[in-house]
Image (cartoon, rainbow, N blue to C red):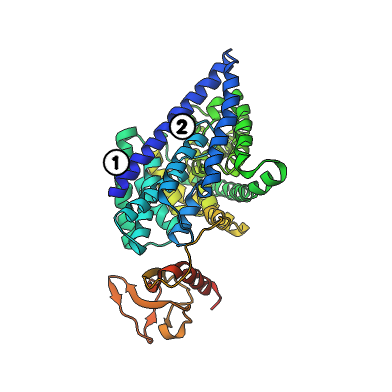
């Protein structure tokens, strides 16, 4: 709870400052449009100076680049050693410099890394190491997403599903306490209205559920294209832009000027665009152009390496795709017009579920952000279809793919004499299912010390059979935790 309250303060300040700067940026572009062209000089100067300052921060601390979620994942697996204060202040300042002036980046990834830094700082200040330290980092990450979107349940589940990869009861309860604390602070600052409060009068009837399959297919195919394009951007920057990597942000800022001069309200992460759909349905041509522009500019912005997330840009792209699909179906007479906003909502969850491969988080996040439970069933259908399409095409979770490209800085490897633990859940069909402890080839340095089975904790012997649904508690030397965990995961992926 303490970590959540502190994270709530940090992320609320981060979110508030970004909102004020983005509002000022839009106002400046509107002044240019209404006959005050001298403001353009300020925009050009700022679009060179600001990314240079943000780039210097990234050059000094490379692990604040991008969303920060892959870095948090690597921290929790002991594959990355970071100084929490260096991350905290530089991510805070760098995120504001990158997101506030209107780049097509989201605040949620940086908020998660800010929360993780708060959790790490709290743990180190109070002398916690090993598992308590990792749980503190996970708590901070949950609080960061909760405060960014006023979504405590989704923030907790995102940590379990996407970051921690373990539905541990201790992690679940601790992260939930942190997320609730952070959400309380954010609610005091921003009010109780859901972040994407979209009102609609009619639930989608069952005879229209066939559209959910078509929408999920579209989101899955374009979600896979999003993954491939995003992962290719650093290579394209290196090939096409003759600048040092830390100056690539200048290109993203200068390109964004063109959008600001044309449509300033399109700038930023995209939540204002989503809310506008609840007020008036745009024409199909405008929606197609909006998708192309936001897709391209979000790629340019994230590919530059500046601090900023893809979470909210993904949701806004999904909303636009849902609107495009609905408008096409409406125009050909296959869908009643009153269901337009429904498809905007459904597509946000589906697009994120496909790209992030985190369907539970997608469903709960949109439910909390919109503030209504009546669309859970269609959200689930669209999310499952989009997830399956990306899976069939060979797409991996986007944050896992980004993590694989990190320049990791692990702690020095040597026997410390300090014990750490690894929790391994045993799924149906696992190589460990119905296997005696003595019959599995455990990695060197791994010692199975307990098996959690329901409410019981068993002390295993060589003859103990491991069952599906068990959670294995494995003791290792602290410095070899990441290595042994990776070996275990590799062994469990091998055919039986």
- The vertical placement of 375 against 462, above or below, is above
Report whether 170 appears left or right of 16: left
Question: For the point 57% across and 47% down, which residue is it?
Answer: 219
**Image disc number at residue 435:** none
**In this figure, which residue is indicated by the disc labeled 2?**
275
**Image disc number at residue 184:** 1
Image x and y of residue 183, in percent: 32, 42
**Res 201 visible:** no
Image x and y of residue 16, in percent: 40, 33
- The vertical placement of 469 against 21, above or below, is below
Which secondary structure lies at badge 1? helix
Image x and y of residue 67, in percent: 50, 46
Question: For the point 34% across and 42% down, which residue is it?
Answer: 8
Out of 20 and 391, give the one closest to the viewer: 20
Image x and y of residue 302, in percent: 57, 42
Q: Comparing marks 1 and 2, which lies closer to the viewer? A: 1
**Res 458 visible:** yes
- How many angstroms separate mark 1 from mark 2 (CA)? 23 Å
The furthest residue to the top? 35
- The vertical placement of 439 against 380, above or below, is below
Total labels drawn: 2
Q: Quadrant of residue 197?
A: top left
Question: For the point 29% across and 35% down, which residue is it?
Answer: 188
Task: Judge the density around disc 1: few (<14), some (14-19), many (≥20) Cα neighbours within 10 Å.
Answer: many
């Amino acid at each position: 709870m303490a970590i959540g309250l502190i994270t709530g303060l940090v992320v609320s300040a981060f979110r508030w400052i970004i909102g004020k700067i983005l509002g000022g940026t839009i106002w400046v572009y509107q002044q240019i449009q209404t006959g005050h062209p001298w403001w353009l000089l300020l925009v050009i100067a700022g679009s060179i100076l600001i990314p240079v300052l943000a780039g210097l921060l990234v050059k000094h601390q490379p692990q604040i680049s991008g969303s920060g979620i892959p870095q948090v994942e690597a921290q929790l697996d002991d594959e990355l050693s970071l100084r929490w204060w260096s991350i905290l202040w530089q991510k805070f300042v760098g995120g504001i410099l990158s997101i506030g002036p209107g780049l097509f980046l989201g605040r949620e990834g940086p908020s998660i890394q800010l929360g993780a830094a708060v959790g790490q700082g709290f743990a180190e200040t109070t002398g916690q190491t090993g598992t308590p330290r990792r749980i503190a980092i996970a708590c901070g990450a949950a609080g960061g997403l909760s405060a960014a979107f006023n979504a405590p349940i989704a923030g907790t589940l995102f940590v379990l599903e996407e970051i921690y990869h373990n539905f541990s009861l201790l992690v679940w309860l601790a992260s939930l306490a942190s997320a609730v604390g952070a959400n309380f602070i954010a609610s005091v600052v921003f009010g109780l209205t859901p972040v994407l409060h979209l009102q609609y009068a009619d639930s989608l009837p069952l005879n229209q559920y066939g559209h959910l399959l078509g929408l999920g297919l579209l989101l899955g195919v374009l979600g896979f294209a999003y993954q491939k394009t995003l992962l290719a951007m650093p290579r394209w920057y290196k090939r096409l832009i003759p600048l040092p990597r830390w100056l690539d942000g200048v290109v993203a800022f200068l390109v964004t000027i063109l959008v600001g001069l044309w449509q300033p309200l399109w700038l930023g992460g995209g939540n204002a665009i989503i809310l506008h759909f609840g007020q008036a349905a745009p024409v199909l041509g405008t929606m197609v152009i909006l998708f192309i522009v936001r897709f391209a500019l979000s790629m340019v912005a994230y590919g530059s390496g500046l601090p900023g997330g893809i979470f909210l840009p993904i949701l806004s792209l999904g909303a636009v795709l849902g609107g495009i699909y609905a408008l096409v179906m409406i125009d050909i007479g296959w869908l009643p017009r009153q269901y337009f906003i429904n498809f905007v909502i459904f597509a946000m969850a589906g697009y994120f579920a496909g790209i992030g491969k985190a369907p539970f988080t997608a469903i709960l996040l949109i439910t909390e952000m919109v503030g209504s439970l009546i669309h859970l069933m269609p959200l689930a259908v669209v999310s499952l279809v989009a997830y399956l399409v990306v899976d069939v095409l060979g797409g991996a979770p986007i944050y896992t793919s980004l993590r694989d490209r990190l320049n990791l800085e692990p702690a020095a490897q040597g026997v410390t004499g300090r014990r750490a633990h690894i929790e391994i859940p045993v799924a149906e069909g696992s190589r460990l299912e119905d296997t005696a402890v003595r019959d599995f080839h455990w990695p060197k340095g791994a010692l199975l010390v307990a098996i959690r089975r329901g409410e019981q904790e068993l002390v295993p012997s060589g003859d103990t059979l491991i069952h599906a649904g068990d959670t294995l508690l494995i003791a290792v030397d602290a410095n070899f935790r990441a290595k042994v965990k990776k070996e275990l995961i590799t062994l469990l992926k091998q055919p039986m």
